[in-house]
Structure formats: C-alpha cells, structure tokens
Image (cartoon, helix red, strand yellow):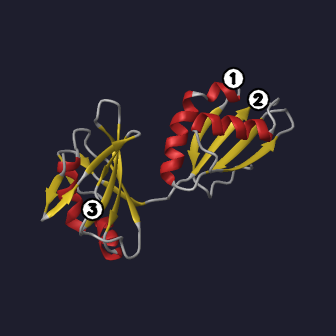
Amino acid sequence: MPVNWLGLTYNLERTNGQCIIGPPAVLGEPEVPKEIMVAGLPKRFGPEELIPILSAAGQVYKIRLYQDYSGLNRGFCYVNYTSFEASCKAMKLNGLEVVRGQRLKVFPSKHIRTIAMMNIEKTMNQTAIREKIADVTKTTEFKLRTKRFMYGFQNARIEFPTPEDALNAIRSLNSFAFVFGQNCIIRLCNGQETQEY
C-alpha cells in the first residue's frame, strides 16, 4: 500500500529482504546522488513512520529499508534525497530521539560493494571459486581476486557493481559457505580495508 506525504505518493516494493520506498513518479533523479545511512530505527517503524521523520531534512527521493522475514525492520535504512543540500541537512538528524531512549545514528553511506571470503579450501583454484560464486549468487557480474597463503588456505575478495548486488550475494553465499571450505568465513568489507587479497 503506497504512503502519501506532502502531496507525494511513495510506492512500496518488497524484494530480497528490503522494502524500497519510492521514488514518487513526479520526481526526477537527484541532481547529485548522495546516499545516507540511518541506523537506530525502532523495529516497529515502517514506511509510514520513516517518511515524515526523514523528510524533516528535505524532500525524500527513495528509501531502502532492510527487513527480517517477519517484516520488521533490521534497524537501519538508506535514504536518497532530491537535493545534495537535503542530504547534508539529514546529517543533523543524528542523535534525534525518535522514541524514548532510542536515537537515530546518521552516516554517509560507504557504498559497500565488496565481500571478503577467508579460509577457502586449499584445493579450490580461482576458476572453481569463480564458478561456485556464480552458481550460488546466480550472477557473473563481479570481480574476483584471490590470495594463497603459506599454510594452504586462501582468501578472496569479490567486488560487485552495486551495494544491492553485494547484499543479495552475501545472503546467498552465507547459506552455502560450506561449499568453499569447512572454516570459510564470509562478510561484507569496506573497499579500503587493508587485508591482503
């Protein structure tokens, strides 16, 4: 069911553990896209509660709200505003008390598009790793770098085109981590992390 706020209609689309809120049909693409991450959301907050709060900084273009299987939010979302100024003003929502004792935490989005895999089975070569990743994630749109270590285990770094692709991929990969090795660890990582790959 769409949400109406200040004369705009924000349609909702639920897919892959997230609820996409907007963009309203009458709004054009943001002039300078800048995504903001908002954490500290009360679990019961949905689109009807978020749009008015986040609109305090300016006109909201789109919100990506992450949800669990029961439909409750996971405590964070990503917001795009129609103007760069509104995105900057949204940073002032940091610390806003939305319910008693619960405050928002607002950050510039890091646009995390990279997944790190550690302790991959030593018998797998880069081609086998690539094929298994493609099979599990159902995409071949990624860059893969691997690094072998002296004791036989290896690590990999997988870079996807968008943060959404990386989030969808990590959900699938974590369910099948065992195919890469008994002790394989998979996590999102910031592209500036210093671990060698």
Q: Earlier in the sequence, mark 1 or mark 2?
A: 2
Q: Secondary structure at mark 2?
A: loop
What's the residue at 71%, 26% (across, down)?
Answer: 181
Kind of residue at disc 1: Gln
Is residue 43 or residue 4 the one in the foreground?
A: 4
Q: Position of residue 144 (x, y in %)?
A: 71, 48
Kind of residue at disc 3: Leu
Please give the label number shown on residue 182.
1
Residue linked to disc 3: 93
Please give the label number shown on residue 22.
none
- Mark 1 neighbour class, 10 Å CA radius: few under 14, some 14 to 19, many 20 or more: few
Is residue 155 or residue 65 the one in the foreground?
A: 65
Q: CA distance from mark 1 to mark 2?
A: 8 Å
Residue linked to disc 2: 121
What's the residue at 63%, 33% (across, down)?
Answer: 185
Task: Name the outermost residue toward the right.
Answer: 150
Mark 2 touches mark 3? (CB < 8 Å): no
Q: In which quadrant will I find the N terminus?
A: top left
Q: CA distance from mark 1 to mark 3?
A: 44 Å
Q: Secondary structure at mark 1?
A: loop
Q: Earlier in the sequence, mark 2 or mark 3?
A: 3
Kind of residue at disc 2: Glu
What's the residue at 81%, 37% (across, down)?
Answer: 125
Image: 17 above or below 50: above
Q: Earlier in the sequence, mark 1 or mark 3?
A: 3
Is residue 179 or residue 77 the one in the foreground?
A: 179
Q: Is residue 171 left or right of residue 98?
A: right
Nearer to us of marks 2 and 3 is: 2
Q: Position of residue 110 (x, y in %)?
A: 49, 59
Q: Position of residue 37 (x, y in %)?
A: 38, 56
Q: Is residue 44 left or right of residue 147?
A: left
What's the residue at 71%, 37% (across, down)?
Answer: 131
